[in-house]
Each structure stands twice: as structure tokens, then as C-alpha cells.
């Protein structure tokens, strides 16, 4: 029986269902999701995330690595890899006076990797690009009326990608991803009177992004000996320039429209469409170096994104192209150690991982004194992270292939550089199942 023919329709159906589910996930509770495209995601899966998010120089036959598409060619002709990740996250926010906690659980990603031709491999999957999810506010007063001003937002960008890599010469691989980038964004400001029975007012802005995204990758490996190698990796993503309609409205309700989603407005104050607003996602440069032996791996990555002066609709944040964004710098470093990957002892085959990361924020925010509502200028934040994790190996006795259950623990801190901004501590537990199986063959007997 041809196993390939039997299972590919199931794969297509599973990917379709997962696309719908993952596209609806929020996965973030951060007030900084109000700006730009939200909180950006790092394209590091499973084991990579536990090593601080390194990916550019990672080249392994048992791990999907969409962070550098050149890695797909490191796969033998009979291997199929299925990779699925879920996570739970606790976010604790504080402005120095008040604090609040949020919890999230998410399906993070799904990715597949498989051989195409000799020295050529492919991958397909669904990944998050950015996440928007926030709900915060405070009490304000206007004349003798006190009201609660609340900011709420949902949405984000996801990407369905297909990638391929080719190894034209020994030790050199080149690859590319083509992704369909899509997502919906909704940003609202709700004014709820506290001292009167006046109507609740909601100002809302909505827009959607649908565009193609391209990623190019290269990897070169140098074998120091039979068990030691160094891999250099580099990636480049061109700038995306697109247009979208921004739907802006101000409506009055008798109660909170978020608590009663089917509630119709009693008054429509305004409803406008800004057609063809310009949006840009900038070009990205990345490079990384990895050193690997049978027992040990260590790597470091650097990323640079040219966000400064990128186009975005001023209707959404009241900022300009000159003060909205910062160029983003990110450094990731990590390591993995296994006592003996070939040992009969299970503990000796466990992979121990750890890593650190640092980046500045690509967004600026308008900062106001909460007491006087006076604007004091622009602010931003730096983000620090630390990760640890385990890789629990499972051997298929029939094929000898190795699958891995990856468990990771992460802590990150968004550290603001201006007074009155919110600091955020995030704790994350992630579980990833990496299944390595023989698929491309015909069985002689059932």
C-alpha cells in the first residue's frame, strides 16, 4: 500500500483546520500590542527556543528550522518530520503603582519537513508573525463627569509558508521560504461613564493585511573532524509594501459592546473608510554561527530590521513615520549538551538546553502622566530573556529514527526607558513534539 498517497490528504486537511485555529489565537497580553503590528514573534521552534532562539546556524536532520530555510536540505531521502508546539504564559504588568496578571494558552505553530529530490528538502507550516492582545485603562474626569477610559485590541499576523533548500555542493546549502502573510487588527477606545447614565462610546479602527513574504537563506558548514563542525548561516527578507483599507467608526451603546458582542449601537456618530493606507514591513538581515560536536552545541545569532521610517497609518496611533519606529537589533545565544546520544541509558540521551536573548523594541509609544494627562514625550523598552529546556528522546524500534519531546521554560522582561510606562514580566512553559518518521516508502504487506 502507498502510504504517501494515503496520508497526504490528511495532512492537507489538518493544515487547513490548524490555520483557522492558530489565526484566532491571541497569545499576548501586552499594552505595547497597541502600536505597530503588535508584539513580534521569533521564528524559533521547540529546541531552538530553549536555546535562546538561535536558528540561523542550526543545521540538523531531526529538527524543522524555518528560521533559516537553507537548513531543509539536511535530511535523508526517507525521513519525514512533524513538529507541533503549544505553550502557556503568565504575564505580570506593573506601572510602579498598580499591577495585573494575565494568563494565556496557545497552539504556537505546526511545521512539516520532508525530502523533495536528491540533496533537496522542503518544509511547510503555519507560524505566528505578530500578536495583538491588550485590555487596559484608567479613570478620567471631564468637567463634573467621571468616566473609565479603556483601550482594547485583538489580532495579529500569521504566516503559512512553503520552503525548499538545495545543497549544490558539499557543505553549502541555499534555500527560500514563500509565505502568505495574513491577519486582522482591531483597536478600540471605550469611554464608560461612572457618575451618570450616559451612553457608552466606542471609537474603533479595523484593518486587515494580506501579502506575500519572502525569506532567503544560506548555510555553509566546515567539518573540523568527523564529529566536529562549524556552520555559518545568513538570512535576508525583502521589504514588504502593501496597502489596506482602515475602517474607522465612533458608536454609542447602552452597555459594553465587548460584554455583549451582538449588541447593536443606538447611535452611529461617524463611520469612515480610509482607502489604500500604506503599510510596510522592513527588510531583515540575520547571521549566525554554530559549533557542534556529538555531545555539545553552542551558537549565536544577530538580527537587524530597518523599521525606522516604515509606512503605517497615522489614523491608528496618531504618530508619524519619523517617530513611530526604531530599527530593531536582536542578539540570541544558546547551547545544548547531551551526555551520550547513543547510550542505552535514557538519562544519558536527554538533551539539556539553555540560552539568553536581548533586543530593543521596534516601536515607540506616546507617554502621558496618568495624573495630569500631560504628554511627556516618546518612550520605548528593551527586552531581556532567558530560556532553559529538556529534550526527551524516543526511538522508533522499527526504523531507528529519533523523535523528541521538548519541554522549555522561559522568562523575559520588557524594561521601559521612560517614567509612567508599563514594565512586563513574562513566564512561559512550552511543549513541543518533534516526530521523525519514515513516510516515503511502500510497504510490502499490511
Image (cartoon, helix red, strand yellow):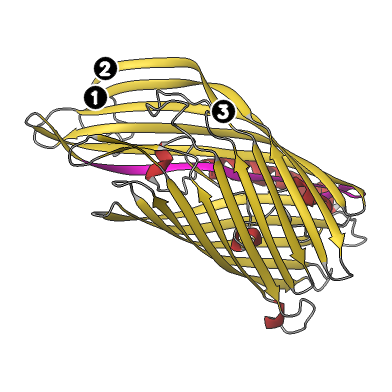
Q: Is residue 377 left or right of residue 381?
A: left
**Residue 64 figure quarter:** bottom right
Camera-side residue of 43 and 418: 418
Q: Looking at this view, is 413 or 87 the one in front?
A: 413
Residue 74 visible in image: no
Q: How many marks?
A: 3
Q: Which residues are magenta?
A: 114-138
Picture coordinates of residue 345 (x, y %)?
A: 73, 84
Packing grade of label 1 (10 A; few <14, some 14-19, many >=20) is many
Left or right side of 272 for 352: right
Q: Is residue 260 left or right of residue 114?
A: left
Seen in the picture, residue 73 relative to 189 is either above or below; the reply is below
Residue identifier under label 1: 252
Dot 3 lies on which element? strand
> Where residue 107 sits in the image (x, y, percent)?
55, 52
Question: Along the horizontal axis of the image, is 302 left or right of 360?
Answer: right
Q: Which residue appears at 75% of the width and 46% of the height?
A: 69
- Quick one: quadrant of the C terminus? bottom right
Density class for disc 2 (Cα within 10 Å; few <14, some 14-19, many ≥20) is few
State how far apart marks 2 and 3 are (Cα). Answer: 31 Å
From the image, which quarter does the N terminus lie in? bottom right
Mark 3 highlights which residue?
280
Residue at the spot 70% in from the left edge and 65% down from the top edge: 298
SS at mark 1 in the image:
strand
Whether residue 387 appears in this view of the structure is yes
Q: Quadrant of residue 315?
A: top left
On the image, numbered disc 2 is attached to which residue?
Answer: 269
Q: Can you tell which mark lies on residue 241?
A: none
Q: Given this view, does label 1 or label 3 mark the residue nearer the observer?
A: 3
Mark before the other along the chain sequence, 2 or 1: 1
Near-viewer residue (412 or 108)? 412
Q: Mark 3 Cα within 10 Å, few/some/many (few <14, many 20+)?
A: some
Amino acid at each position: 500500500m502507498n502510504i504517501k498517497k494515503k496520508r497526504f490528504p490528511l495532512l492537507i486537511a489538518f493544515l487547513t483546520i490548524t490555520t483557522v485555529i492558530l489565526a484566532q489565537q491571541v497569545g499576548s497580553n501586552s499594552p505595547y500590542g497597541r502600536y505597530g503590528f503588535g508584539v513580534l514573534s521569533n521564528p524559533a521552534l521547540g529546541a531552538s527556543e530553549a536555546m535562546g532562539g538561535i536558528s540561523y546556524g542550526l543545521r540538523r536532520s531531526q529538527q524543522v528550522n524555518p528560521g533559516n530555510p537553507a537548513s531543509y536540505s539536511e535530511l535523508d531521502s526517507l525521513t519525514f518530520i512533524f513538529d507541533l508546539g503549544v505553550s502557556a504564559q503568565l504575564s505580570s504588568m506593573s506601572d510602579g503603582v498598580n499591577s495585573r496578571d494575565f494568563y494565556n494558552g496557545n497552539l504556537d505553530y505546526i511545521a512539516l519537513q520532508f525530502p523533495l529530490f536528491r540533496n533537496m528538502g522542503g518544509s511547510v507550516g503555519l507560524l505566528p508573525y505578530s500578536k495583538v492582545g491588550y485590555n487596559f485603562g484608567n479613570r478620567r474626569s471631564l468637567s463634573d463627569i467621571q468616566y473609565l477610559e479603556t483601550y482594547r485590541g485583538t489580532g495579529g499576523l500569521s504566516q503559512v509558508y512553503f520552503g525548499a533548500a538545495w545543497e549544490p555542493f558539499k557543505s553549502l546549502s541555499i534555500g527560500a521560504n514563500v509565505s502568505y502573510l495574513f491577519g486582522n487588527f482591531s483597536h478600540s477606545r471605550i469611554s464608560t461613564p461612572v457618575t451618570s447614565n450616559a451612553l457608552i462610546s466606542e471609537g474603533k479602527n479595523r484593518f486587515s493585511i494580506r501579502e506575500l513574504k519572502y525569506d532567503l537563506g544560506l548555510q555553509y558548514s566546515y567539518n573540523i573532524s568527523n564529529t566536529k563542525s562549524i556552520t555559518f548561516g545568513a538570512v535576508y527578507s525583502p521589504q514588504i509594501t502593501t496597502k489596506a483599507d482602515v475602517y474607522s467608526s465612533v458608536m454609542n451603546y447602552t452597555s459594553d459592546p465587548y460584554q455583549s458582542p451582538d449588541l447593536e449601537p443606538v447611535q452611529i456618530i461617524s463611520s469612515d473608510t480610509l482607502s489604500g493606507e500604506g503599510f510596510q514591513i522592513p527588510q531583515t538581515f540575520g547571521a549566525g554561527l554554530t559549533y557542534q560536536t556529538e555531545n555539545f552545541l553552542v551558537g549565536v545569532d544577530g538580527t537587524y530590521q530597518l523599521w525606522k521610517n516604515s509606512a503605517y497609518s497615522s489614523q491608528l496611533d496618531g504618530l508619524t513615520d519619523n517617530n513611530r519606529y526604531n530599527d530593531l537589533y536582536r542578539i540570541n545565544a544558546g547551547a545544548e549538551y547531551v551526555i551520550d546520544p547513543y547510550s542505552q541509558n535514557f538519562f544519558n540521551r536527554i538533551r539539556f538546553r539553555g540560552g539568553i536573548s536581548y533586543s530593543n523594541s521596534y516601536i515607540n509609544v506616546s507617554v502621558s502622566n496618568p495624573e495630569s494627562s500631560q504628554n511627556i514625550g516618546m518612550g520605548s523598552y528593551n527586552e531581556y530573556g532567558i530560556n532553559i529546556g529538556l529534550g526527551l528522546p524516543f526511538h522508533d524500534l522499527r526504523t531507528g529514527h529519533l523523535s523528541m519531546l521538548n519541554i522549555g521554560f522561559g522568562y523575559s522582561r520588557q524594561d521601559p526607558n521612560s517614567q509612567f510606562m508599563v514594565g512586563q514580566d513574562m513566564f512561559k512553559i512550552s511543549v513541543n513534539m518533534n516526530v521523525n518518521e519514515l513516510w516515503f516508502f511502500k510497504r510490502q504487506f499490511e
